[in-house]
């Protein structure tokens, strides 16, 4: 039977999460991985993210998204949009599809700048603004990576129109 234990989540405003952290959680972030490496949260993000709406202001994910199958990617980006507050920053680093390292047996999706741009701008109804998008070679591994820095921009609904200039 699958369980999703959450060990400890210490909310500090603003809250930051590291998705797919494995054995290393970025300093100051709450680590999330589906396997138990001793991080804060053991959770399979294919079932959503275990955080309330608009509760996260920064997301970091390095070499995780390529482990999602194509059919899980839309839901993942939807969940990022749901849990992130307006103005949140998301940094995603993934192997570039041109790298040999991207074609390992446990990578289920393949990425380049254009694919990331298409997914990030279409899946969440324009909620993501791409601040930086490019590729470079990782100094340690020698592998090409795609790095995206995106900002969450949540639009006001018609019911919350700005009336500050009405006298």
Image (cartoon, rainbow, N blue to C red):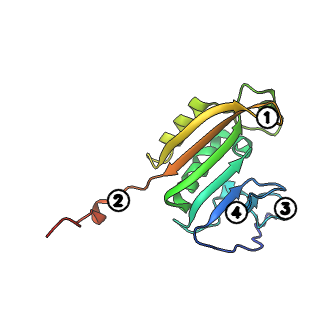
Mark 3 is surrounded, within 10 Å at the Cα level, by few (under 14), some (14 to 19) or many (20 or more) other residues, namely some
Judging by the rendered image, the residue that carries numbered circle 4 is: 29
Nearer to us: label 1 or label 4:
1
Judging by the rendered image, the residue that carries numbered circle 1 is: 139
Q: Secondary structure at mark 3?
A: loop
Q: In which image quadrant can residue 155 be found?
A: bottom left
Task: Give the distance between the C-alpha atoms of the residues marked 2 and 1, in whole angstroms.
Answer: 42 Å
Most extreme residue toward the left is 167
Q: Secondary structure at mark 1?
A: loop
- Residue 72 badge: none
Nearest the camera: 135 or 79? 135
Nearest the camera: 21 or 50? 21
In the picture, measured across the screen, residue 75 lies left or right of residue 104, that is left
Q: In which image quadrant can residue 142 be found?
A: top right
Most extreme residue toward the top is 98
Q: In which image quadrant can residue 58 be found?
A: bottom right
Say which residue appears at 62% left-offset and 48% top-offset.
91
Task: Give the distance between the C-alpha atoms of the residues marked 3 and 4, in whole angstroms.
Answer: 16 Å
């Amino acid at each position: 039977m699958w369980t999703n234990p959450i060990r400890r989540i210490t909310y500090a405003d603003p809250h930051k999460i590291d998705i797919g952290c494995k054995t290393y959680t970025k300093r100051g972030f709450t680590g999330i991985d589906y396997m138990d490496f001793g991080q804060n949260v053991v959770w399979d993000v294919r079932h959503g993210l275990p955080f309330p709406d608009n509760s996260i202001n920064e997301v970091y994910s390095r070499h995780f998204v390529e482990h999602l199958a194509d059919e899980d990617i839309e839901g993942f980006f939807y969940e990022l949009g749901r849990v992130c507050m307006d103005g949140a920053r998301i940094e995603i680093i993934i192997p570039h599809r041109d790298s040999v390292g991207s074609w390992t047996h446990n990578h289920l999706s393949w990425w380049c700048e254009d694919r990331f741009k298409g997914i990030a701008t279409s899946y969440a109804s324009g909620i993501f603004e791409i601040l930086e998008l490019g590729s470079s070679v990782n100094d340690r591994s020698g592998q090409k990576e795609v790095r995206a820095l995106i900002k969450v921009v949540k639009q006001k609904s018609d019911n919350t129109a700005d009336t500050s200039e009405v006298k």
